[in-house]
Image (cartoon, grey):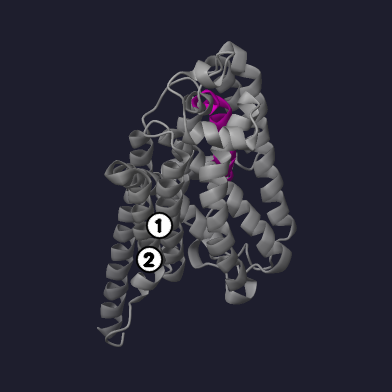
Amino acid sequence: MPPGRPGPVFKIFGWSFAITAVAIVVAFFYGSWEAVALVVILGILEVSLSFDNAVINATVLRRMSDFWQKIFLTIGIVIAVFGMRLVFPLVIVWAAAGLGPVDAMRLALNPPADDAAYFPDGSPSYETLITDAHPQIAAFGGMFLLMLFLGFVFEEREHTWLSWLEKPLAKAGKLDMLSVVVAGVGLVLAAEFLAEDDKISTVMVSGVLGMVTYIAVNGLGNLFHVPGEDEEESSSGPSDLAKATGKAGFFLFLYLEVLDASFSFDGVVGAFAITADPIIIALGLGFIGAMFVRSLTVFLVRKGTLDDYVYLEHGAHWAIGALATILLVSIGVHINEILTGLVGVVLIGLAFWSSVRRNRRLAAEGHADEAKVNV
């Protein structure tokens, strides 16, 4: 690398650091040092919860053409920041309280000390409305992610990480629609034993919508399948000629956006345990957290990390399975967001360590073979 020129890592993460600095400055003028601290905490929370998101995003992003990769990194980040971290909580309030957009934003920015001062009928506050909607959100996101996880483990692959478990699951996956059956049973159990009586029906509907969304988006991606994508993507990645363009690229982009939204549910809802201010949430989760997750995704693609460390994709999918389970359990039991983040980090860390051990073993065997030839 010529002296004085930024390295590839800086090029990838440079925008994230710059936007983080801007977000911190905006937070300071918005709410002084307290707002800065909250924004930084939320950013760290989002990144810690989204390691598995970045790995899975990378497995899809590397299948897309350069044009659609740029769309994901530009328009996609706008959707992630403003759509999921700012508009999504407001939509929940609109639907739950029947407020208009302006009134919902006013309530979010200026919560009254007494709910009755804003709602004469005694309706709950903005934060309470978001929290009360958690079972429906968790059911939708949990079922979408569970379908993604099951689709991975029920499929035979050349490489297996937890072979003692993945190989039997892959054989069982030969049974048609097994993932739908398992997910459906999981949804019924979650609704029956974890949801409150008055929320059973809404949890069921939300969960079914999560399953339908996954099947529809995944099916559209398969419909516009790019020739060559089935040839061991997980180990070698598609060639440049096989990368998705046109309609195939669009539906992969759509799939990525829905996937990213499902991953962000727990972070958005969990953020209300820290603050209910939508501006601070958007700055922390969106401008800092979502940007770093995007940069990490690009880093994994550009560096070919998934090809070099073949078990990372497996670890990320097991982390998804754990996150889906946590979301479904959280319908009736509060689970600390720190635990959610740690599970993902630990599983991906173990998968990375296993990949390093595999690479060292293969390198040693390669040197041994070379030595035998020389002899």
Residue drawn at point x = 59 percent, y = 11 percent: 197
Q: Quadrant of residue 244?
A: bottom right
Q: Please report contact status of discs 1 and 2: CB closer than 8 Å, yes or no.
A: yes
* Amino acid under disc 1: Phe
Residue labelled with disc 1: 292
* Amino acid under disc 2: Phe
Q: Quadrant of residue 322?
A: top left
Q: What is the secondary structure assignment of the residue under circle 1?
A: helix
Asked whether residue 141 appears in the rendered view, the answer is: no
Q: Is residue 188 magenta?
A: no
CA distance separating discs 1 and 2? 7 Å
Up/down of 121 relative to 162, above or below = above
Q: Is residue 33 left or right of residue 92?
A: left
Residue labelled with disc 2: 13
Q: Quadrant of the N terminus?
A: bottom left
Residue 227 image point, x, y percent: 69, 68
Q: Quadrant of residue 42?
A: top left
Residue drawn at point x = 30 percent, y = 82 percent: 373
Asked whether residue 215 appears in the rendered view, the answer is: yes
**Foreground: 163 or 20?**
20
Q: Which residues are magenta?
A: 131-153
Among all residues in the image, which is located at the extreme front?
117
The overriding secondary structure of the stretch rendered in magenta is helix
